Each structure stands twice: as structure tokens, then as C-alpha cells.
Image: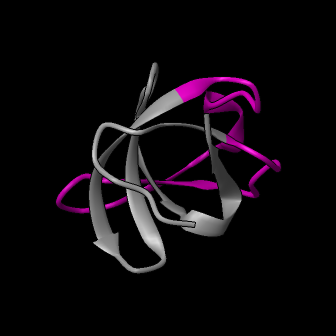
Amino acid sequence: MKLEIKDKVKLIAPLSYLKTSDNMPMLRPPDLVAIDEVGEVVSIRSPKTVEIRFRRGSFLIDIDKVEKI
């Protein structure tokens, strides 16, 4: 899937943890983001990882764990 900055996405499966996109990333509990919550792509970190801003923060998530809406 090809994602671009400002695309709206949502999770398609529950995650075991969330990784923050801070300068010093931390692991956070997965219940900070609901499956049906819509987020916005803020940056593309690698071909397989994107930074997504949700209501409770920005997290680094694998591209195969989200779908474009």
C-alpha cells in the first residue's frame, strides 16, 4: 500500500504495543489507540514504517497494520 503525508488511516488489527515517535521512543500500552480511531500520517520513516498522529499522541506503526480510508 502506498501512503502519503496527510492521508487518513485506521488500524486494521490490535497491536501488542505502541512505539512513540519522540526523539527517544518509548513503548506504550496498545489501548491508547482504538481499532476504529482515525489518524493522520505525519511522516514516512521508512518504506515499511509511518508516523501517525492519533488523538492521544503520535506513534510509529508498520504500514501493514493500517488501512487508508
* Residue closest to the far top: 55
Q: Is residue 37 magenta?
A: yes
What span is colored magenta in the figure? 11-38
Percent position of residue 2, x then y: 47, 65
**Res 50 quadrant in image:** bottom left
Tell me if residue 57 comes above or below residue 3 in the rendering: above
Q: Nearer the viewer, residue 54 or 38?
A: 38
Residue at image coords 61%, 34% = 69
Tell me which residue sits at (30%, 37%) in the image.
Answer: 6
The residue at the point 43 percent across, 57 percent down is 3
Query: Residue 27 in the image: x percent, y percent?
Result: 51, 57
**Does residue 63 appear left or right of residue 57 in this picture?**
right
From the viewer's perspective, is residue 51 above or below residue 45? above
Q: Which residue sits furthest bottom?
A: 47
Q: Is residue 7 left or right of residue 61?
A: left
Magenta: main secondary structure: loop
